[in-house]
Amino acid sequence: MTDSSESSGTSEDKAGTASSVEPEPEAGTVTEPEPATAPATAAGPVPAAGSGIAPTAFLEVRDLQVHFPTDDGLVKSVDGLSFALEKGKTLGIVGESGSGKSVTSLAVMGLHRASRQQRSKVRMSGEIWLDGKELVGAEPDEVRRLRGREMAMIFQDPLSALHPYYTVGQQIVEAYRVHNDVDKKTARKRAVEMLDRVGIPQPDKRVDDHPHQFSGGMRQRAMIAMALVNNPELLIADEPTTALDVTVQAQILDLIRDLQKEFGSAVVIITHDLGVVAELADDLLVMYGGRCVERGPAERIFATPQHPYTWGLLGSMPRIDRDQTDRLIPVKGAPPSLINVPSGCAFHPRCPYADVPKDNLTRTVRPELGQVDGGHFSACHMAPQERERIWTEEIAPKL
Amino acid sequence: MTETTDDESQNTPADGPGDAASPAASDAEPLLRVRGLMRHFPITKGLLKRQVGAVQAVDGIDFDVYPGETLGVVGESGCGKSTMGRLITRLDEPTGGSIEFEGKDITHLSTGRLRPMRRDVQMIFQDPYGSLNPRHTIGGIIGTPFRLQGVEPEGGVKKEVQRLLELVGLSPEHYNRYPHEFSGGQRQRIGIARALALKPKLVVADEPVSALDVSIQAQVVNLMDDLQDELGLTYVIIAHDLSVIRHVSDRIAVMYLGKIVELSDRASLYASPLHPYTKALLSAVPVPDPKRRTERDRILLKGDVPSPINPPSGCRFRTRCWKATEVCTTTEPPLVALRTGHQVACHHPEPVTGEPAAAGGAGGKESTGGHA
Ligand SMILES: Nc1ncnc2c1ncn2[C@@H]1O[C@H](COP(=O)(O)OP(=O)(O)OP(=O)(O)O)[C@@H](O)[C@H]1O
Ligand SMILES: Nc1ncnc2c1ncn2[C@@H]1O[C@H](COP(=O)(O)OP(=O)(O)O)[C@@H](O)[C@H]1O
Ligand code: SF4
Ligand code: SF4
Ligand SMILES: [Mg+2]
Ligand SMILES: [Mg+2]
């Protein structure tokens, strides 16, 4: 199905012409049951890419594909991903390392195509709609103007986002003045205010510090201050707390939650930690091998997860909120290479139930997302009754 | 520094009842006995390398490790966990205190005299990528300990390495492969195989799973568990993840800024932590259950961990503690047993029989405000 994107030339001429990509059967099946007027949510239906119809959701990603040609072969980092997000809501994206989470977030931010050099190394297709504007086909300059103002990003490693040479204040001032026509003094006042807002003690003094004079947690806060200085309507946080201790993590998650409440932004939080998404997310999207294997309202996915991979994630983690278990239930094997994604269901080499669906279906046909019940989707060949039985009899009692 | 405190803790009989330095029911001799352990890294200045201060990475800690048990060590980044691990394996030399292994003082043994003990005590490192030499084959890496120790295993090194590979769930055919051909979880298994080569008695694992994905973490945790049963290993497992620590440990030491602030049986610690810091740590662990986010009383600590170069006087946690009073500034609280198998170093510990939940609420209220 990716033939078209592989055979076409550069990403540049590819980008805008999402219509050349064949619509995914996935999108077709999921749209059906919902009335056309229903507001799209991360859990809800997402129309096929190529429809070109502006969505009603604030952020909507349709059949996104991000492939990187390399010497070893084509890396299909993201291979047909769709989701939607409303303002004021938080979407959590979880998955193992290398499942395509960061590539997805960089795609939304337009960062794979920011420079000519990057553009020549990536093949992107599909649609990303932000507030009625389509970004995959948009001019990189146009996307750059949105970046920092309408959408902002928090990275895992704050040092990669903060310049070591400039003071924290200078960097926040710069970020503010790019999008606001104000004098330096006003901008500095704004920087101090933001540092205060994210809980930096003595912000009027610390504003003149260099990043290396901040602790890890403070740098993370400074980066959040910088990301939020223009009140972005979309905030993408990619593993914002992975490098931090739990006590600092709790502070940062609280901060993101408060700020979202105050500004009503849409937030995408990317993490491999199911605990972190459970703290923040309204909706959840589970990624495996560059694709979504399960998505829906967070409460429902945690209460009745449908996909064997999601079961695996839940069984692998020791839980402090449950009675001590004797043994963890790991997922066997290792995550797939995105150059050679297993045929059929990408999870089949690791799935204990790969032989449950008949006729070797699991290894030959790729399962598409199907609706479980209102807003909850899963991509697995097992029949619903079978999944239900395995979940209640075999999985749930052991968690 | 506070000599009295160290002396006091040293006086506590290590195997007496109610002493958390020992597991409640054990009369056995400890495998490892640590008293007043200290590691200060000197900070020097100028050409003459005049010492102007010290990083008090580990500053007077006492604990015992008993045969067959797992002692977990938790604490935030920089609190001295890894330094402690390097000291008890004698990869580094203490600047104070003592370490006894099987009753023998190894605190200051020279490299040569340490050699026999090196067989018995092994370390597993955090980084499955950095700790394996990329230019050596797996066979070479796992076989190194035999060469270093001049040991010829029965049936030869190759055969023994292949047996070890199977033991940790890898294929003996991997013998001639290189580390880059393996995933993170597999590399960690290689590190474990190398640590087990000489049939050690004590294995110190520094963040053995924190660089791995959750699904892979569980594989390695289960493997370490099986190996402990099979080979009768004793573990000291260092980690910052409180859920992992609860899963793997029999007893747990909580560290803060170079000190052990609480040392307890697992059940007692998680059911009712006595130290405010432990309480805050436990309350901060994210729980994979969205329904619980509203019910939880989270204690948000203010600010950051102070520098170990200039730790606060008295109790080191006082700059972030919502219960701190005058005495916390002036006097360092000693580590004392308040319950059987549960020691804590705090002037105002949580009520020993109290409802943890009720106390958490009060603490939460006073201590929020990490940000305005
Ligand atoms: N060789 C050294 N020279 C000077 N200071 C050091 C040295 N090694 C460690 N330290 C300092 O000692 C303190 C304790 O470090 P250590 O590595 O033991 O922390 P840790 O608890 O293992 O932290 P983490 O969870 O981040 O691994 C830190 O302040 C560290 O910077
Ligand atoms: N610029 C690039 N060129 C080639 N491959 C890439 C590039 N960026 C990411 N990848 C690959 O894409 C896959 C997904 O990466 P990423 O989205 O960073 O994973 P994660 O889910 O851990 O954030 C990985 O296999 C990664 O190696
Ligand atoms: S489709 Fe088959 S292999 Fe994939 S998750 Fe379902 S049962 Fe497992
Ligand atoms: S001794 Fe004082 S400052 Fe230290 S933890 Fe106890 S109450 Fe808090
Ligand atoms: Mg990533
Ligand atoms: Mg460490």
Image: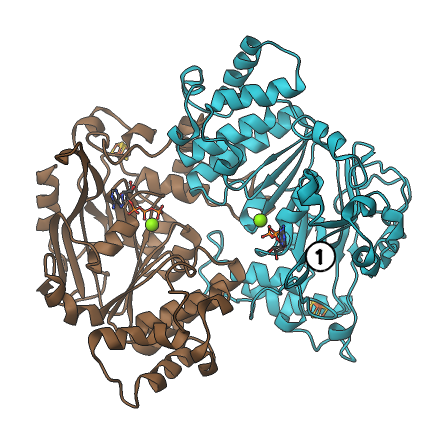
Q: Residue B103 vs residue A255: left or right?
A: left
Q: Residue B177 vs residue A137: left or right?
A: left
Q: Residue at x 63, y 11 (%)?
A: A182
Chain rendered cyan: A
Between B349 and A3, the residue placed more toward the observer is: A3
Relative image position of residue A372 (x, y in whole percent): 78, 57
Relative image position of residue A211 (x, y in whole percent): 43, 29
Relative image position of residue B249 (x, y in whole percent): 34, 60
Q: Which residue is mark 1?
A: A291
Q: Is residue B28 visible?
A: no
* Rendered colour, chain B: brown
Quadrant of res A2 = bottom right
Total marks in image:
1
Colour approach in the figure: by chain
Q: Residue at x 83, y 33 (%)?
A: A132
| Vertical position of residue B320 compared to residue A375: above or below | above
Q: Secondary structure at mark 1?
A: strand
| Vertical position of residue A194 compared to residue B320: above or below | above
How crowded pointer 1 is (Cα within 10 Å; few <14, some 14-19, many 20+) is rated as many
| Vertical position of residue A308 compared to residue A170: above or below | below
Label 1: chain? Answer: A
- Quadrant of the snapshot with the C terminus of chain A: bottom right
Between B321 and A78, the residue placed more toward the observer is: A78
Disc 1 marks a residue whose amino acid type is Arg
